[in-house]
Image: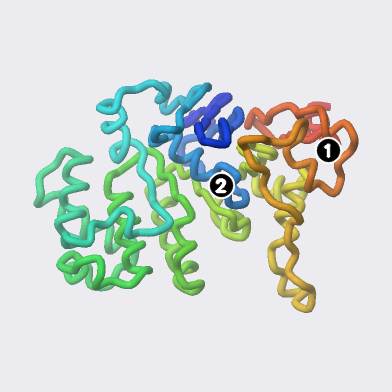
Amino acid sequence: MSEKLVEISDLKTTFETNSGTVEALRGINLTIDEGERVGLVGESGSGKSVTARSILQLIDSPGEIAGGTISFDGRDLVGLSSREMQRVRGRDITMIFQDPSMSLDPVYSIRNQMVEAIGHNRNIGDQRAEEIAVEYLELVDMPNPERVLSSYPHELSGGMKQRVSIAMTLGFNPDLVIADEPTTALDVTVQKKVLEIFKDVVEREDLSVLWITHNLGVVAEFCDRIAVIYAGEIVEYGTVYDIFDRPTHPYTRELLRTIPNVQRAQEELRVIEGTVPNMADPPDGCTFHPRCPDAEARCETTRPESVDGDHHEAACLVHDTQTNDRE
C-alpha cells in the first residue's frame, strides 16, 4: 500500500473582517498518498485556494489557521517558523498558479528565473540547473527551449508561460505539486494540450498532486480521487468512479448536472440555484440546505458528521454513505 504523504486533520482557517469572523475552512480532513492525484472541486468561494494556501502556510493577516494539523511526510507544518517553511516550499511542496505571471518576474529572462529557482531548491550550480531547465522544458513539449530561455515573459504566449511555470515547478523535484486551476486562464485548445503534458510528466515522475479546480471534467481525466468542497467543508470524498457513477451528496449531484453533455445539446446549461453562503454568518445545520433539492427539516438545525477522507463518504443527513459503506 502507498504511504500517506499528506494528512490534513480538522483544519480550520479563519479571517477577521469588519463583518465578523469568516470561517473559510471548517474542519477539513483530507489525505494524499505518495504518487496519488487528488482533485479538490467546488464553486468559487468554497475554500479551494484557502486549502492550498493553508498547506503552504501562506495565510496572511487577518487570516490564521485556527485549529487542526497538516502532516506532510510525518511532520506537522502548522506552527513551523517562516525559515522552516521556506525550506519546505519549493523543495518539498510546489505550487502552479492559475495565472503563470504570478510565478514569473517580467524584468528577468526565463533563463535567469529558472536557473536561480532550480539551483536554489536543488542546491546545485548554475550549469547543472540550466541543464535541468532545458530537460524539463523539453519534457513539457516546449519548442526550441534555448530560445525560450533567452526570452522574457512578455515575449511568450499564455500557453508557453504556463509550460515554463510547470517546467520550473517540476524541475524543483518536489514530493507534492499543488496545481491551482493552472489551465483556467488558457484558450480551450491550449488547456487540453497543457493538461495532457502535465499528466504525462506527473505519471513519468510519479508525483503526488493536489489539483484544485471547479471543472469536474478535468479531474475525471486526471485524478485518482476527488474531494468535493462546499462552504469550507469537504462534503463528499471518493474515487473518480464513486463521484461520477454513484455520487451521494446533493451538492455533488448538482455540480455534475452543470457539466455540458453533447448528447443533450439542445438542453439549457444547468446552474445551481442560489450562492455559496456568507461564511461570516453561515446557515445553521447543513450549510447547503438553503440550496438543496433534497433538504429536510432536520437539515436546518443538525450539522452532518464531517468526512474523514478514508473511503467514499458524504456529509449528508439524508444520503449517508458513511453509514451505507460500513454496513
> Which residue is painted at 46% across and 40% down in the image?
52
> Which residue is painted at 40% across and 25% down in the image?
77
Image quarter of residue 120: top left
User: Residue 64 location, x and y as percent?
Assistant: 45, 29
> Can you name the residue that lies furthest to the front here?
18
Instruction: Report how far apart the C-alphas of labels 2 and 1 lie in the structure.
Output: 22 Å
User: Is 174 placed left or right of 116 in the picture?
Assistant: right
User: Residue 215 location, x and y as percent?
Assistant: 59, 58
Compared with 322, 242 (above or below) is: below
User: Residue 44 location, x and y as percent?
Assistant: 58, 51
Residue of label 1: 319
User: Is 98 placed left or right of 285 in the picture?
Assistant: left
**Label 2 sits on what residue type?**
Gly
Residue of label 2: 39
Q: Secondary structure at mark 1?
A: loop
Q: Secondary structure at mark 2?
A: strand
Residue closest to the eye, 205 or 219: 219
Image quarter of residue 261: bottom right
**Label 1 sits on what residue type?**
His
User: Is 184 placed left or right of 303 in the picture?
Assistant: left
The answer to which of marks 2 and 1 sits earlier in the sequence is 2
